[in-house]
Image (cartoon, rainbow, N blue to C red):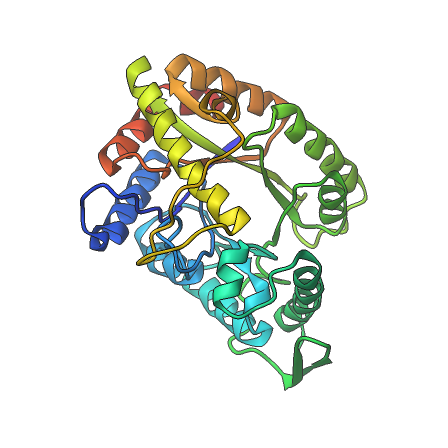
Amino acid sequence: MQIGIELGGYWPTHGEHINNLVPEMLKVVSKVDHLGFDAIVVGEHHFMDYGATPSPLAILSHIAPLVSVRRLVAAILMLPVHDSAILAGDIALVDHLTKGRLEIGPGRGGAPYEFERMCQPSDVESLREIYDEKFLLLRKLLTECNVTFKGRHCATDNVTIMPPVLQKPHPPIWQTCQRNEAAYHSAKNGYHVFTSSLRRPMSYVQSLLDAFREGVKESVSPHARPEFAHLQWLYVAKDDADAEQKLRIAYEKQKKFWAIFNNTLIVDNGRIPTAEMPVTLDELAKGLVIGTRAYVEDRLIEMMEMGIDLMVMKTGFGASNADELASLERFAEYIHPLLK
């Protein structure tokens, strides 16, 4: 099982200036490179301290010459808000800047909070229609020359991106899936599948993985076999008291997500407030891998035995940068060798 990390860009209210956000992210990047991780994942989010990563491609192009990590994944990219032709050109350029290590995850996400502030449709049906059309055009632009396309939401006239992509036919593509049907069709079409299980049992992930494997059997992938990635909140605590503190920090962050998801918030200076959830701390803890070494080890061995290809750790959920780095050190010393 390969190991990756998500750079979440979360800036909790911990008394330090937000100008420390990027330097602290780069400390994490340096640490995971030193520890020999397989992937760095960055998602696109706007207008919030919950996820201050508005340009994953910019972040990955900056860190590429600093690390030897072989997989640099921009996922998700909020495709409905992008011009497909411009995004295709950006992807191609970053593919060269990363020397062919770039992987992309175009998606419908993020939250209604973000779309409404861009004066974009935020309902599921509109987003799906816009996404499907722009995704079709994006794939054509990455693989063809002189592209002419006319749809309801996007159009091009004799467009060829320059430079063309370095990887052929294009950088590997990830699709975020939360339904079995989506996992099956994504794998069948040759795409990698990315999912998470927060607030759900691992049986939910197993069901997605089973559907994914059925799709792989019929895959027409232009790359190697499609892969299955799982995003998991994770922290290796130094003791039980440390684990309990980090669970409470994670719970507070999840209350921010709940506010964004339901779009029931008033934001001031980009700081997302919390909202009460119909989930207790103990219930949420079941979906997280936050605990001492033995607990984390058991949970990750379970994921490895399931056959997950890439486990992406979400370690930036509100703990201090020093604690996050210490957790990564404990992970690398005790747990990573078992998974390798």
- Looking at the picture, how far across and down is residue 266, in whole percent? 41, 54
Say if residue 5 shows up in the picture. no
Q: Is residue 180 above or below residue 222?
A: above
Residue 94: x %, y % from top left: 45, 65
Snapshot quadrant of residue 32: top left
Q: Residue at x 38, y 55 (%)?
A: 267
**Residue 10 higher or lower than 153, as above or below:** above
| Among the 4 quarters of the image, the one containing residue 131 | bottom right
Whether residue 177 can be seen here: yes
Residue at the left extreme, as displayed: 16
- Considering depth in this image, is 93 or 256 the residue closer to the camera? 256
Residue at image coords 18%, 43% = 15
Out of 188 and 279, give the one closest to the viewer: 279
In the depicted structure, whether residue 121 falls above or below residue 199: below
Q: Image point 53% across, 58% down: which residue? A: 77
Quadrant housing the N terminus: top right
Residue at 44 percent across and 61 percent down: it is 57
Q: Quadrant of residue 121?
A: bottom right
| Total residue callouts | 0
The single residue placed furthest to the bottom in the displayed view is 157
- Residue 39, given in percent of the width and then of the height, sits at 45, 43
220 left or right of 172 in image: right
- 224 horizontally vs 314: left or right: right
Residue 93 or residue 124, whichever sits in front: 124
- The percent position of residue 315, horizontal first and vertical second, equals 38, 35
